[in-house]
Amino acid sequence: MDKIRTVFFRNDDVGLFSSEPVSSELVNLTQTFIEENIPISHGVVPEAVNEETVKWLLEVKSKYPHLIGIEQHGFSHTKHEKGEFGGRRGYEEQKGDIMAGMEFMKHNFGVRFSWCFTSPWVKYNSHTKRICDELGFKVFSGGVSPKVQARVFNAIGRLFNLNVLGPKEVSYHRTRRFDQKGFRIAEISPSIDVIKDYRERTLKKLDAIRMRYDNCRKHFDVIGFLLHQWVFDTRDKIQIIRELLIELKKDEELTFHLLENIQSRRR
């Protein structure tokens, strides 16, 4: 590689799909990142997370402040049409949910809250990012693809300063810049989903993840991996992620950062 690149890991759905006081999948995944000394940003669902998980997150963040990020992942993770914030949901309705989630995050996590917002199912409409910007979030994280058709689509959407174009979301995650005209909030989005099938809870093979990563390197300076901890329910799956982390660490031209720190480092 001919330039320094930044890698981040975003883990969504904290608070969902577990009957345990603190999800063992969340604990095991987090411990793997701590052991490999690589940051991981956790997306908390405000209306779903329990007190025990909040307490655990605060404890692990206190012990490893540079390795653990705490983000807001929507509000209730309730699907409205395409996603929690996609489709025809209006400004006031979305703002009520996002504000309620924000107040929960501020009250429960205080200064440890990252002020990053991630939208469930990577769906949003023309209001969502605007609301997050108005409320003072510093990062909006959706999703971005390195495929040529996606890059052309996003280029057209950016030309007209749109957040959605037709039925699809426009990404402002670009090489070097993550800004949008008229917005203070940066969009920094993952481009590699390591999960193959959510219903079956299966991961992609390491070779498939490598292929996607190699494609992303051609187009992005900042490359994000998307995780969902509830899928990592076996040692074999955890081992796949550990092998990925070990492999990435061998590249001396990579740096690893929490989602919340990327934009400030690039200004």
Image (spheres, rainbow, N blue to C red):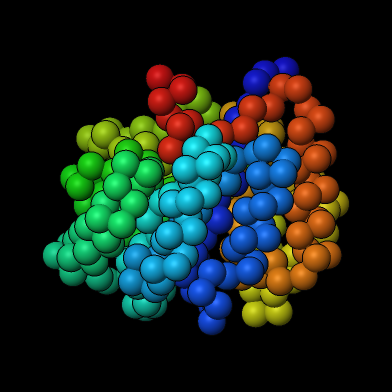
The image quarter in which residue 97 lies:
bottom left
Residue drawn at 67 percent across, 18 percent down: 3
Picture layout, residue 63 above or below residue 109: above
Instruction: Give the tally of numbered discs.
Output: 0
The image quarter in which residue 103 lies:
bottom left
Report whether residue 76 is seen: yes
Give the position of the C terminus as an image quadrant: top left
Taking the view exactly as shown, the residue that stands out farthest to the left is 92
Residue drawn at 31 percent across, 57 percent down: 108
**Percent coordinates x, y for residue 14 in the rendering:** 49, 64
Picture layout, residue 103 above or below residue 260: below
**Percent coordinates x, y for residue 75 in the rendering:** 33, 66
Residue drawn at 76 percent across, 59 percent down: 238
Give the position of the N terminus as an image quadrant: top right
**Percent coordinates x, y for residue 8 in the rendering:** 58, 40
Question: In this image, 77 relative to 38: left or right?
Answer: left
Q: Nearer the viewer, residue 55 or 246?
A: 55
Q: Nearer the viewer, residue 188 or 31?
A: 31
Question: In this image, 249 relative to 53: left or right?
Answer: right
Q: Nearer the viewer, residue 6 or 187?
A: 6
Residue drawn at 47 percent across, 43 percent down: 62
Picture layout, residue 263 above or below residue 173: above
The image quarter in which residue 48 lies:
bottom left
Report whether residue 190 is seen: no
**Percent coordinates x, y for residue 122 in the rendering:** 46, 60
